[in-house]
Amino acid sequence: MNLQELLRISSRTFAIGIERLPQALSNAITIAYLLLRVSDYLEDNEEMDANEKIDLLNLWIKILRKEAPVEELTKHLSGANKDNPDALVAQQAQDIIMQLHALPLVLQEIIIHHVIKSTQGMARWTKTGPKVDNEADLDDYMFEVAGRVGYLVTQLFAWHSDEIRRKEKEIMPLAREFGLGLQTVNIIRGLREDFDRGWVYVPNNFLSEVGISSEQLFDPSCRLKALRVLDLLTNKAERHLKNALQYIKFLPWWEYGIRIGCILPLLFAIRTLSLSRNNAQVFESEAKMTREEVKKIVLHSTLWGWSNFWLDRYYNKLSATGE
């Protein structure tokens, strides 16, 4: 199975955007994304206890530093459930590492640096456990798993584009916000699934503000209070995503592939957020776009993604009512 197939299996929505990047960037970001999926698999694995997860995350860091052979990890994961897309990616770690080392050295260094930093953050949070006291704690977690990805892709874009390189320092804070916005939407989408595996990423101060516990958040008799908590989360997501919108508007119109690669995940996120807002169903299952909605967003973005005027209008339309 080649890396493109692994990418599509692990995330069809992210694959749509990554495949529209210029070829060199698409290849590098595919590899970076798959390396991070290995880290995600080790962090989220429900069949391992916390100590085993931490040990394997640290082993993965050693592998990325060339301090341990990748076979140490893949042998350990040989019996993993092949129906799990992330497990399948992790089992292919050797091939992904080989493709990583075939990249230009400067790209390898960018990717390895940020994947290691993100994996270290995951190990730290695995050790801490599901303890999110306030919004700063949540932002810290989301930065490790997503904000650093914003840094990674921005540095890759800057390698490719002189214009983006000139703006790199200016847009780096927005890159962090982009990652936090996408991850906040992921948390909203995964509220029920995370709760079922023992994690609640909702800050405790959000819960105390409306007088509800993490368990009551999923109790149908407490839906009104739960929806107030959901409002706090959706408002937070929208604040981050508005900064992500600004990030894209800084990208030059002639870097069309890069713009489309960023526009699609942003618009998918704002549409998902509009479906989740004030929707009690998110406490039972995630809100999802239809395939037709995805196709329409892709079509419109492909036609008009060079225009910041169009982007503002379409973003606001999806945020308010969708299509």
Image (tube, rainbow, N blue to C red):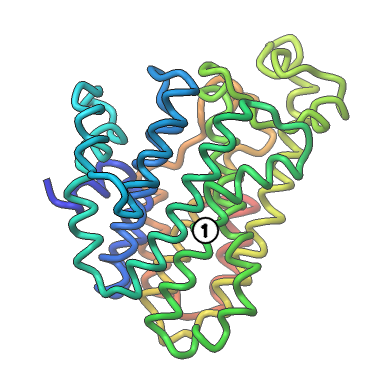
Residue 128 image position (x, y, % from top left): 63, 29
Please name the residue shown 38% across and 17% down the image.
47
* Position of 185 relative to 296 (above/below): above
- Which is more toward the observer, 190 or 87? 87
Query: What is the crowding at mark 1: few (fewer than 14 residues within 10 Å), some, or many (at least 20)?
Result: many
Instruction: Look at the image and tell me in which quarter the N terminus lies.
Output: top left
Please name the residue shown 77% across and 17% down the image.
213
Residue 182 image position (x, y, % from top left): 55, 50
Q: Quadrant of residue 216?
A: top right
Residue 313 image position (x, y, % from top left): 60, 69
Label count reads 1
Q: Quadrant of residue 257?
A: bottom left
Residue pushed farthest left?
A: 1
Residue 95 image position (x, y, % from top left): 17, 49
Please name the residue shown 41% across and 69% down the image.
260
Please name the residue shown 42% across and 58% down the image.
297
* Position of 183 relative to 31 (above/below): above
Residue type, numbered disc 1: Leu
* Position of 280 relative to 241 (above/below): above
- The residue to which callout 1 is attached is 266
Give the SS element for disc 1: helix
Say whether residue 14 is left or right of residue 172: left
- Which is more toward the observer, 58 or 139? 58
